[in-house]
Each structure stands twice: as structure tokens, then as C-alpha cells.
Image: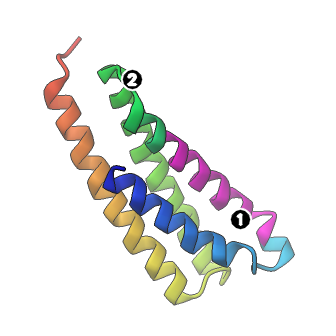
Amino acid sequence: MPTVLIRIKEAYHVWHEKFVNIKRLERYTIGAKIDAEFQSLLELIFRACFAHDRFEKLSMVSNAVGTNDILKFFLQIGWEHKVLDHEDYAKLILLLDEVGRQLGGWKKSLQEKTPAQ
């Protein structure tokens, strides 16, 4: 299993442990948004790992990079509104930064191998 997929699964595990204990109002607003972005990112990375077409793979990895950035943005909002404590936020951001670096490297590699159209 690719390392980037392992890392995003670890990050989702950290998030999900926190998500189930969030107050109801936050769980169904910002919490639901963060959870949806996590699920979207998990799906994009999984699909990219097993896509055969290079253009499709590059498209999915590019979308995953953007989704990762959006996810970090909403986590920051959750932290600012005290939905997440400092420790959980720091753990998640570190994992997502690593995922972002891996996705960036993967994207660059795919761009080098894919002829321009």
C-alpha cells in the first residue's frame, strides 16, 4: 500500500476519534464538513493509487492536493472555534503536511512522465 494512503488513513483515524466526541452542533456543521473533506481525500488518493491512465491519475492527484489544502483550512477554522484542541490540531496538521508533500512529489513525478497535450 502506498505511503500516502497509509498517512491519510492515519490522519482520518486521529480525526474520527475526535469527531465522535465533538458537541452536537459542531459535529453537524464544521465537523461534518471536515469529515466529508477527509472522505473525499481518502477516495481521491485511493483512486489515484490504482488508476491505470496517467492523465486520470494526474487529475486525481491534482484534485487531492487541492482537497488537502481545503481540509487544512477547515481544520484551522475548527481549531479557531475550539472544536479541536491544540494537540489534536497539531497532530492532524503534521500528518496532512506530510500527505501534502507526498502528493506534491507524486504530482511532479506524474507531470514529468506525462507528455503535454
Q: Quadrant of residue 82?
A: bottom right
Stretch of the chain drawn in magenta:
27-44
- Judged from this view, the residue extending furthest toward the left is 112
Q: Which disc number belongs to residue 56?
A: 2
N-terminal of the pair, mark 2 or mark 1, is: 1
Q: CA distance from mark 2 to mark 1?
A: 31 Å
Instruction: Please tell me in which quadrant of the rendered image residue 100 appears.
Output: bottom left
Q: Residues within 10 Å of mark 2 (few under 14, many from 20)?
A: few
Query: What type is the residue that disc 1 sits on?
Result: Ile
Say if the magenta span includes residue 45. Answer: no
The residue at 59%/79% (across/down) is 80
35 is within the stretch colored magenta:
yes
Up-down relation of residue 93 to residue 100 (above or below): below
- The circle on residue 67 is none
Viewer-closest of 67 and 1: 1
Report if the CB atoms under discs 2 and 1 are less than 8 Å apart. no
Q: Residue at x 44, y 55 (%)?
A: 69
Q: Amino acid at mark 2?
A: Glu
84 lies above or below 43:
below
Please name the residue shown 51% across and 79% down the image.
89
State the residue position of label 1. 30
Q: Nearer the viewer, residue 82 or 19?
A: 19
Query: In which quadrant is the C terminus drawn?
Result: top left
Residue 95: x and y, percent? Answer: 40, 69
Mark count: 2
